Image: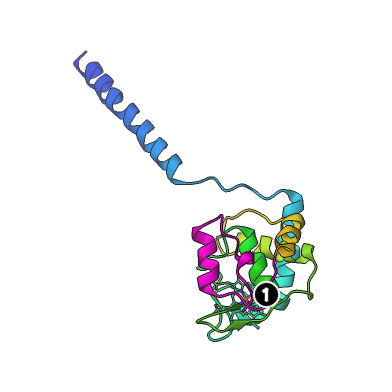
Amino acid sequence: MCSTTFTARVLATAIPLCWCVALLTASATTPVIPLTPAQQRQFESGRMLFDMTCAACHGFDGQGREGLGANLVTSKYVQAPPAVLVRILTNGKQGSVGVMPALMGQFSDSQFANVLTYVRRAWGHTASAVTTGEVLRSRQSIVRTGPWTDRELSAFLTDKRRDPASVPPR
Ligand code: HEC
């Protein structure tokens, strides 16, 4: 009788505790939205394009190469709104690592979407896939030619209402 009461008490304490731990764990991890089969195909095409075009400077592992390309595993831009990435690919970027050339005109909107889908899901990243429509809309709103700088792009990250396309060309 005594041991039954004891067991009941232990259970009464343990069950709510388990719930608490389970709830805390669930809220700490944001669920990763799986890619659809079509997005998975985008990812695979994007990987080929990345390996052929971007890896020379950024490395196949995305960790960057000194003086040649920034680290895309730790970059704050990779999982930012795709509009920021479209700007980097379209006009290039200049900063402490070096200069990334503008890739505008070399790739179609769907190729940009594929390579960005790859970059945003590779190396542990869990950001959304990018559609051709998103690339088209972002690209059409860009009215400059020079490479972007960290100052301009960071402003876009902290204030979502401020579109970097509105920054006049240098
Ligand atoms: C000729 C070399 C070169 C090529 C090719 C190149 N990049 Fe870059 N990329 C750079 C450099 C250099 C930077 C960093 C510029 C700076 O110092 O701010 C950069 C920056 C970036 C950034 C921003 C990262 C950050 O935190 O600054 C992204 C995203 C990016 N590149 C993606 C790509 C993708 C995707 C491709 C292929 C389609 C590509 N790059 C091709 C050289 C290159």
Residue closest to the eye, 151 or 54: 151
Question: Toward which corner of the image does residue 136 lie, by quadrant?
Answer: bottom right
166 is higher (above) or lower (below) than 4: below
Q: Position of residue 77 (x, y in %)?
A: 55, 65
Does residue 14 appear to the left or right of 58 in the view shown?
Answer: left
Identify the coloring: rainbow
Q: Name which residue lies at 73% across and 66% down.
A: 112
Q: Name which residue lies at 57% across and 48% down.
A: 32
Q: Position of residue 115 (x, y in %)?
A: 70, 66
Residue closest to the eye, 75 or 65: 75
The quarter of the rendered structure image containing the N terminus is: top left
Q: Amino acid at mark 1?
A: Asn
Residue closest to the eye, 60 or 96: 96
Residue 103 visible in image: yes
Residue 73 visible in image: no
Does residue 51 appear to the left or right of 164 in the view shown?
Answer: right
Q: Which residues are magenta?
A: 142-170
Would you name the residue on which mark 1 appears?
91
Image quarter for ligand 1:
bottom right
Q: Position of residue 82 (x, y in %)?
A: 64, 59
Q: Name which residue lies at 67% across and 55% down.
A: 129
Residue 24 part of the magenta-drawn span? no
90 is higher (above) or lower (below) than 130: below
Question: Toward which corner of the image does residue 124 lie, by quadrant?
Answer: bottom right
Residue 147 part of the magenta-drawn span? yes
34 is higher (above) or lower (below) than 56: above
92 is higher (above) or lower (below) than 25: below
Does residue 165 appear to the left or right of 13 in the view shown?
Answer: right
The quarter of the rendered structure image containing the C terminus is: bottom right
Label 1 Cα crowd, 10 Å radius (few <14 / some 14-19 / many 20+) = many
| Pointer 1 residue Cβ closer than 8 Å to ligand 1 | no
Question: Toward which corner of the image does residue 81 lie, by quadrant?
Answer: bottom right
